[in-house]
Image (cartoon, rainbow, N blue to C red):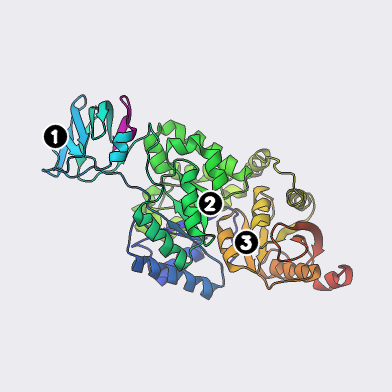
């Protein structure tokens, strides 16, 4: 299914989008990747959605990526005897390990690892930062605080600790169970929540054992500080602006977003910009102008994908939200300024033969009348390197591996096509020409660039670039071998 844009759209599934008809409508409207939120729903409910996605994929003959988003360690206060309490600015308030119901002066925080890491002067944020506490004194089982920003605190509200790296396991028991379940289902990507450092990624990678690619969510200050190492350990990144905007000053989030997107692109690893992109469309069929500008900004930055959360999972207008993102992307990518920004932000990186091949492919495609770049890839690396170049023409990623095609659905500009295993380059060129014509990218009169590696079906051997006609008769008459 050909898209008229290069940026990808991730749609979260939920109660508003759990039927075959709706999931198919979302894909036809523009959703390239479906996100399964492991924080909500039973394994049986997740399995049902997964099965529907694969049915849609088969019925439309269109590869679809599935992203399972692990919950991560959730930090929450305990309960209150009255259900809630109002905390006034300047009041004293204690957090401790006592499981007794809380009141106006204390509540249980059943996470001893937090008390281990706290220091005097540390801050705690409750209920997405609506309540801010400053630690005055702390010990192994308590923290005496003063209320910096008051408000209503109620049962089991979430707690963020922005100032310290917490000695938490990267994966909870629930996460480990969910990870194994998701891998057995056959998801393509696993998203790790609340990553703090590179080593948090290693356990998930070991448990996944190659069955799914690993995507790290950047939503804590510690992750921003250790980002290069986290990026190196991950297959992809999500800039999760929700918690990031709670734990950092909101004014710091936009420049962080820009920096992280550029670093991901330089590393040839896909990046998603997420959270509250079209938040008003949960209730309204029309987005605000500010939301449209936010989506457009992420696209101008060169992100691989933009994501819908509650808009598609629980909103009243899930299909309209996808269509809105699709229209904004098409409009932005048609803007000459977009081309200028993308070209200006291109960073030369790498010195391998594959790096040189994909850079040359982009140069040739942009300076001559080439309709598409067709790259043959087994592991997906060649397609990722081609996407890093952000060429002005479509990328047709040709692979015999369905798993590779699905994972590449998250990558900028990649139109994924399943091809038979090939042994000779001439057959590859013919298949590329057929895919370009079948997808509406080119006619018989046009030319394409084909990149591949010889010997075939060996990862990491990209070493051939060919400008080829889409007329098969000319291929057979002019191509050797």
Whether residue 63 appears in magenta in the rendering, the answer is no
Please state the horizontal and vertical placement of residue 373, each as a whole percent of the image: 72, 58
Whether residue 127 appears in magenta in the rendering, the answer is yes
Please state the horizontal and vertical placement of residue 447, each as a whole percent of the image: 79, 62
Residue of label 2? 305
At a point 73% along the width and 59% down the height, the residue shown is 371
Please state the horizontal and vertical placement of residue 7, each as a whole percent of the image: 57, 52
Task: Bin the neighbour count of mark 3 within 10 Å (Cα to Cα): few under 14, some 14-19, many 20 and up.
Answer: many
Q: Where, quadrant-wise, is the C terminus in this rendering? A: bottom right
Q: Please state the extent of the stretch shown in magenta in the rendering.
A: 117-128
Provide the secondary structure element on which disc 2 rests: strand
**Between 301 and 355, the one nearer to me in the picture:** 355
Disc 2 from disc 1: Cα separation: 44 Å
Observer-side mark, 3 or 1, equals 1
Task: Bin the neighbour count of mark 2 within 10 Å (Cα to Cα): few under 14, some 14-19, many 20 and up.
Answer: many
Please state the horizontal and vertical placement of residue 359, each as a whole percent of the image: 74, 48
Disc 2 from disc 3: Cα separation: 14 Å
Provide the secondary structure element on which disc 3 rests: strand
Residue of label 1? 104
Query: Does residue 157 sit above or below 137 in this rendering?
Result: below
- How many numbered badges does the structure rendering display? 3
């Amino acid at each position: 299914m050909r898209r008229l844009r290069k940026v990808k759209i991730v749609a979260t599934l939920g109660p508003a989008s759990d039927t075959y008809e709706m999931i198919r409508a979302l894909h036809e409207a523009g959703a390239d990747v479906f996100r399964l939120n492991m924080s909500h729903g039973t394994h049986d409910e997740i399995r049902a959605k997964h099965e529907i996605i694969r049915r849609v994929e088969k019925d439309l003959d269109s590869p679809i990526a599935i992203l399972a988003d692990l919950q991560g360690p959730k930090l929450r206060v305990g309960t209150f005897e009255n259900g809630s309490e109002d905390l006034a600015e300047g009041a004293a308030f204690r957090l401790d390990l006592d499981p007794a119901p809380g009141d106006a002066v204390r509540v249980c925080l059943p996470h001893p690892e937090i008390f281990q890491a706290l220091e005097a002067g540390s801050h705690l944020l409750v209920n997405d930062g609506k309540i801010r506490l400053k630690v005055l004194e702390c010990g192994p089982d308590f923290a005496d605080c003063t209320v910096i920003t008051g408000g209503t605190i109620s049962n089991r509200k979430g707690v963020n600790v922005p100032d310290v790296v917490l000695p938490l396991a990267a994966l909870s028991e629930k996460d480990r169970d969910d990870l194994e379940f998701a891998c057995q289902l056959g998801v393509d990507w696993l998203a790790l929540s609340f990553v703090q450092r590179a080593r948090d990624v290693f356990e998930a990678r070991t448990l996944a054992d190659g069955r799914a690619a690993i995507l790290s969510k950047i939503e804590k200050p510690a992750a921003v500080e250790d980002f290069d190492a986290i990026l190196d350990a991950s297959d992809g990144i999500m800039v999760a602006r929700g918690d990031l905007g709670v734990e950092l000053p909101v004014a710091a989030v936009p420049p962080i977003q820009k920096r992280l997107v550029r670093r991901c692109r330089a590393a040839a690893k896909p990046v998603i910009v997420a959270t509250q992109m079209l938040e008003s469309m949960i209730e309204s069929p029309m987005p605000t102008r500010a939301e449209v500008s936010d989506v457009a900004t992420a696209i101008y930055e060169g992100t691989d994908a933009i994501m819908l959360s509650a808009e598609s999972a629980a909103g009243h207008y899930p299909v309209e939200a996808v269509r809105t993102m699709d229209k904004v992307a098409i409009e932005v990518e048609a803007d000459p300024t977009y081309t200028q920004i993308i070209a200006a932000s291109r960073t030369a990186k790498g010195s391998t033969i594959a790096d040189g091949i994909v850079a040359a492919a982009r140069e040739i495609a942009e300076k001559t009348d080439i309709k598409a770049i067709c790259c043959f890839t087994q592991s997906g690396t060649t397609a990722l390197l081609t996407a890093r170049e952000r060429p002005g023409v479509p990328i047709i990623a040709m692979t015999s591996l369905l798993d590779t095609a699905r994972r590449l659905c998250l990558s900028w500009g990649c139109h994924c096509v399943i091809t038979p295993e090939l042994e000779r380059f001439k057959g590859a060129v013919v298949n590329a020409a057929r895919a370009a014509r079948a997808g509406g990218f080119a006619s018989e009169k046009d030319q394409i660039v084909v990149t591949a590696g010889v010997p075939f079906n060996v990862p990491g051997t990209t070493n051939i670039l060919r400008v080829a006609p889409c007329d098969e008769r000319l291929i057979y008459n002019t191509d050797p071998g």
